[in-house]
Image (cartoon, rainbow, N blue to C red):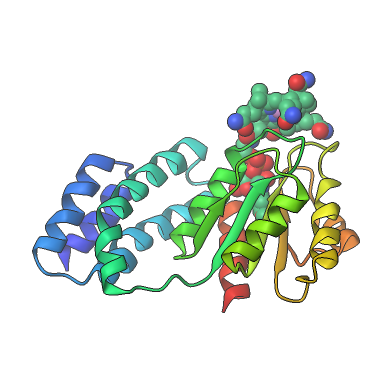
Amino acid sequence: MAILEEISSFLQQGRAPIVKEKVQEAIDQGLEPKEILEKGLLEGMGIIGEKFKKNEVFVPEVLIAARAMNAGVAILKPYLVEAGVESKGTVVIGTVKGDLHDIGKNLVKMMLEGKGLKVIDLGVDVPSEQFIQAAIDNDAQIICCSALLTTTMNEMKNVVIAAQEKGIRNKVKIMVGGAPITQNFCDSIGADGYTADAASAADAALAMCS
Ligand code: B1M
């Protein structure tokens, strides 16, 4: 299984072109797409996530590793669909209305994908109704809201209220995060989960889906 270790290692180094080559090589060798995903790509992304949590690597390395993962996943995607690999859950993510900061949100998205979750990314400046509609349309288990401004964090409460009003509050968990967000704030608006960093957000989301 040396090739899977190579895929993991090149992914951690952020070497997208070699990751693509190695994933194709693994497919040509007859390895199962699910195994390439889980023991190669997700394994590598998981190691990066843990290092990020411990401040052993930083935002640029994570972004580059993510690019390498996306490159590998793009090669694998048609085979995964063919093999019928099911995602472990669906998450709708976005930065709340009025807020254009997306670096942290993109990191959370990447870590979620690294855990095998399907992510519907609504981008930035997302109104509460759009979060709810996307959750309904995609049968999502979780809505993830990111905010970086003290002036926009209260939008998260509107997402919780909109979920109640649309009658889906018992079907969907709402996770919140971003620099100004705290556990107290999460509790005060009636959201279901807060984590301080992207890797922990992915761990929490996976736990909520299972
Ligand atoms: Co802005 N900005 N910014 N900014 N900006 C901050 C946030 C600020 C703290 C700077 C400062 O004054 N010291 C300040 C906010 C102050 C406040 O509200 N108290 C601020 C301001 C004021 C503004 C503007 C109003 C400036 C102006 O125009 N006068 C303006 C607002 C625009 C808008 O959104 N409407 C503005 C604009 C911008 C840029 C466009 C220039 C740029 C954003 C570019 C982009 O995102 N594409 C920008 C940037 C880059 C920053 C700083 C410098 C960096 C933010 C960042 O990306 N950090 C920031 C200062 C700072 O934080 N030091 C600042 C890295 C990122 C990885 O961290 O997003 O916190 P973060 O994500 C973390 C965790 O929070 C967590 O995971 C990540 C890491 O693991 N996380 C989650 C995030 N979302 C999560 C969701 C989860 C769980 C975890 O679950 C769902």
Residue in the image at 86% along x and 55% along y = 185
Can residue 188 be spotted in the picture?
yes
In this view, the residue in front, 114 or 155, is: 155
Q: Quadrant of the N terminus?
A: bottom left
Residue in the image at 12% along x and 56% along y = 25
Can residue 195 be spotted in the picture?
no
Horizontal and vertical percent position of residue 72: 29, 51
Q: Quadrant of ligand 1?
A: top right
Farthest right residue in view = 188
Residue in the image at 26% along x and 69% along y = 82
Horizontal and vertical percent position of residue 191: 80, 63
Image height of 30 relative to 148, above or below = below
Image height of 210 relative to 147, above or below = below
In which quarter of the view is residue 103 placed?
A: top right
Q: Is residue 144 left or right of residue 10?
A: right
Residue in the image at 47% along x and 35% along y = 60
In this view, the residue in front, 91 or 110, is: 91
Q: Is residue 159 left or right of residue 198?
A: right
In this view, the residue in front, 158 or 189, is: 158
